[in-house]
Image: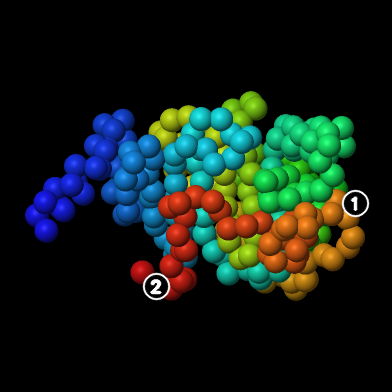
Amino acid sequence: MLDGLKRLFARRAPMPTAWDPVLVWAERQRHVFKPLPDGDGFVVEGHLGALPWRLEWGPAQRSYIGGSELRVRAEPGTSPGVQAMLLDRELQSSMEQAMFDQYVEGVQTRIDQSTPPEMRWLVMLNKASGAELGALREGFAAVSSTREWLASWVEGALAPALLAAPRAPGQPMVLMLARGRMTLRTALPEPAPQALDAWLRVFATALREARRAADQVAPEPPSTQASGWEPSATATDADAGAPGDPQPDDSPEADRLPPTGPR
């Protein structure tokens, strides 16, 4: 048994000293800091009131983000039938161009599981109009299964929070709600505590506004409107259900969040 413990600790990579400020920040905020076993990222867990959230920083899991990325997840208690995605316009344009190149000018004619869910949603869900986006119309785009819910989500505190976010020109950012789970994803080369704290505030605002919108707007079932894009014949039952319904995140550390409840 002692030899087994020695081998276990020997395999763990030492925590980079550059993360010391993050550890201090997490402890001061009463969050829980956990380095990943392979030493290339970390997890911070905390609560917004009684609602648990999970912040992850490490190698990007999406091809549209190079280097390292920040991911924040929580389950706001919204209806699983509500699907919504908010992203910066530069990323929207690059994704739509990639879709055109791959499926129109290329040889592939069907969307399958190899296509990132963000790209599938751009094609399959309802695009928000400028009027629905309000103050976000210049810098952001959005799609959703429920237009009324999306308009309610962005009409309050979320818009100014996103406009004030510490996002550099060209920095990709996606805010996604699927199956009752909200995820914020953005490029972040260095996990400075100030940046983590700022993005966490944006995410907290998105959660609060999602719960407010859920109280104001009755949920609708996912759209079954036919699309010009057909799912692959080999797609899973999850893909063949609601259009563009994404698979659970492919992160090995993205285990299920604990149920909502008091700490």
Tell me if I can see residue 133 in this picture.
no
The quadrant where residue 191 appears = top left
Kindly identify which numbered label has been placed on residue 201.
Answer: none
- Amino acid type shown at disc 1: Gly
- Amino acid type shown at disc 2: Pro
**Residue located 36% across and 69% down the image:** 263
> Which residue is labeled 2 in the image?
262
Is residue 138 positioned above or below 251 on the image?
A: above
Q: Foreground: 111 or 142? A: 111
Q: Check the picture and name the quadrant holding the N terminus.
A: bottom left
What's the CA distance linking mark 2 and mark 1? 46 Å
Q: Are marks 2 and 1 in contact (CB under 8 Å)?
A: no
Kindly identify which numbered label has been placed on residue 228.
Answer: 1
Check the image and name the residue furthest to the left.
Answer: 2
**Residue 119, percent from left and from top:** 73, 45
Side of 169 relative to 59 (left or right): right
Side of 91 relative to 193 (left or right): right
